[in-house]
Image: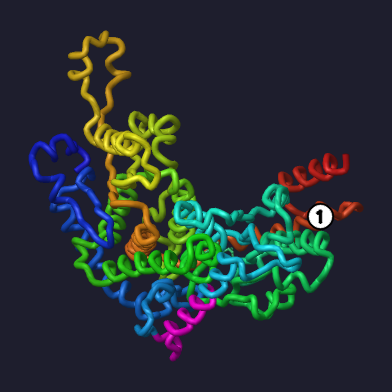
Amino acid sequence: MRKLHLRQLFADDPKRGERYTAEAAGLYLDYSKNRIIDETLRLLLTLAGDCNLHMRIEAMFNGEKINVSERRSALHVALRTPKGESIVVNGVDVVPQVHTVLERMAAFSEQIRNGKWRGHTGKRIRNIVNIGLGGSDLGPMMAYEALRYYSQRDLNFRFVSNVDATDFEEAIRDLDPAETLFIISSKSFTTQETLANAQAARDWCLDKLDDKQSLSRHFVAVSSNSSKAVKFGIDAGNIFDFWDWAGGRYSMTSAIGLSTMIAIGPENFRAMLAGFHAMDQHFRTAPLGQNLPVLMGLLAIWYNNFFDAHTQALLPYDQYLRYFPVYLQQLSMESNGKQITLDGMRAGWQTAPIWWGERGTNGQHSFYQLIHQGTRLIPCDFIGFCQSLNPLGHRQDLLMANLLAQAEALAFGKTAEEIRAEGTPEWLVPHRVLEGNRPSNTLLAERLTPGTLGSLVALYEHSVFTQGVIWNVDSFDQWGVELGKTLTQAIFPQLEVAREPELKHDSSTNTLIRRYRRLRRQ
Ligand code: G6Q
C-alpha cells in the first residue's frame, strides 16, 4: 500500500468517490481519499473483530465497568438516552435520574432566560460565567461557541478555567456582580484551579454586593460532590448533580452543559441530545463496515500504526467550530494517551497520535504548507456544511470551495510534468511539485444545528473509543495528570515561604525555584 498512489486508485475505480462513503445521523463521510483498498478495509475490520470491538461496544452501553483502572462504567451514552428506556448500573436504573436533572436544568435555564430569576438586588441576570477546567470547561466552551447562532443574545457568556488570575480578572472586568451568575462546574469539587477561581468570584461578589445572602442568587454548582459544594457556600438547592460514571471529557451532555442549555434553551439542548443519541444508536447497531465511528477509528489506526503517522489534523470549515479541535484534543489525547494495556502490560505498539487543528481557511495560511509539502504524513479530517448560518453573498461557496480544493490538492498533488507544462523554469520545478497521496476524510452535513453538533461530537467520542479498544488501553482514566498535581502542591509553599526552606528537587528545578524567588521578591 505504501507504493500505491491515490491518483492510481481513483483512476482504477471511477466510482471510488461514491463507494467509500457512509452516512448516519445527518453526517456524510467520504473516506475515499484514504490510502486503502477493499482488502485494507477487510483486514482492518478483521482486526476490529479480533479485538472484540462488538463486545466492547455492548459492554459500554450495558454499563459494564470498562474503566478498569478506576473500576467504573463509562456511561456517557446514558446522558442522552430518551426517557422511558433503561440502563441499569449497580442495580439502579440511571435513565430516570438523568431526566430528573435535565428537567431541573430546564426549569432553571428558563428562569434565567425569561428573567424570572433575579440577582440579589433585583436586577436581571445578564452574564453567565462558567468556572471549571478540563472536561468541565472545554465542552461548555466549545458548545457555546459552536451553537452561538442559537443563543439568547441578551445573555453574555464567559468561561474561566486557568489558575492564572488574568483569566478571571479579564472575564469579570466589565461585569456587574448584581447581574452575574457563576456556575461552578466541578465533578469532584476539589480541583485547585476551579476552587481558586470560585473563591475569587465569591470575594468579588461579596465585595460588591456586601451580603452573604446574595450568594444564593449568584452561585450555582454542577458537581457529584454536593457536600463539598455546600461547604464552599453553594445553596443546596442550587446544585445540579452528575455521576461518577460520566467522565469529565465525556460530560458535556450532563449538567456540565448547564451554560449551554441557558444559552440555547432547553428545546435546542434536547435536539443536541437527540443528535448524540442518533449517533450512539448508529455506533451500537450499524454493521462495522458502514459504521462511521468504527471506520474513522480504524483509519486512524491505519495511519498511526502502519504508516507511523504521528499526528492527526482536525480542520473544521466553520467559524463556529473554532474550539472544536481543542475540545477533541482532550477527548483523544487524554483518553488514549496511554502505554499500559488493560492487562497491565506495556503496549508494544504506538497509541494515540497528537491531535491538533484550526478553522479553515485560517489554517491554510498558516500550517497547511507542511501538510502539503513537508516530510511527514498527516491524515486530515475536513468538516464542512452545505448551508451557512450567516449567508452573505457567495461566501459559503467560497469557504466550501477552499475545503474541497485542499482535500483534492492533498490527495492528487501536482506532478513535475504538469508544472513543466506551465512553462516553469527547470530549477523551480522541484519546489513546485506537490507529490499528493496525502490522506483525508471529509465530513459533510447540511447545516450546523444543535443536533448536528451532537452527532459530530458522539462520532468522535466513539471513534476514540474504537481506537482505544484496538490499542487495548483504558480510554476513560487519566492517571498521567496526577504527578504534576502532587508536585505543584509540594512546590507551591516553597515559592511563597520567605525563609527559603531547603530544596530537595533536582538541580534544574532547584535553580529555577531560586531564580523565581529572587525575581519574585524584586
Ligand atoms: C476529564 C478529566 C479532567 C477533569 C478536570 C476537572 O476527563 O477528568 O479534565 O474534567 O480535571 O475536574 P473536576 O470536574 O472534578 O473539577
Please check the rendered image and state whether residue 94 is part of the magenta-colored stretch, yes or no.
yes
Bounds of the magenta segment: 88-105
The residue depicted at 38 percent of the width and 83 percent of the height is 87
Residue 310 at least partly seen: no
- Whole-percent x and y of residue 27? 28, 56
Please check the rendered image and state whether residue 83 is part of the magenta-colored stretch, yes or no.
no
Tag 1's secondary structure?
helix
Residue 307 at least partly seen: yes
The residue depicted at 18 percent of the width and 36 percent of the height is 5
Task: Name the amino acid, label 1.
Answer: Gln
- Position of the C terminus, as image quadrant, is top right
Tell me if mark 1 has few (under 14), some (14-19) or many (20+) residues whose alpha carbon lies within 10 angstroms of its own. Answer: some
Q: Nearer the viewer, residue 518 or 286?
A: 286
Place residue 186 in its image quadrant: bottom right
Q: Nearer the viewer, residue 371 or 409?
A: 409
Q: Is residue 391 left or right of residue 17?
A: right
Q: Nearer the viewer, residue 252 or 55?
A: 252
- Whole-percent x and y of residue 431? 32, 19
- Whole-percent x and y of residue 15? 9, 45
Q: Which residue is mark 1?
A: 494
- Whole-percent x and y of residue 280? 32, 69
The residue depicted at 84 percent of the width and 65 percent of the height is 210
Q: Is residue 37 left or right of residue 50?
A: left
Magenta span: helix, strand or loop, mainly?
Answer: helix
Against 425, residue 281 (above or below) is below
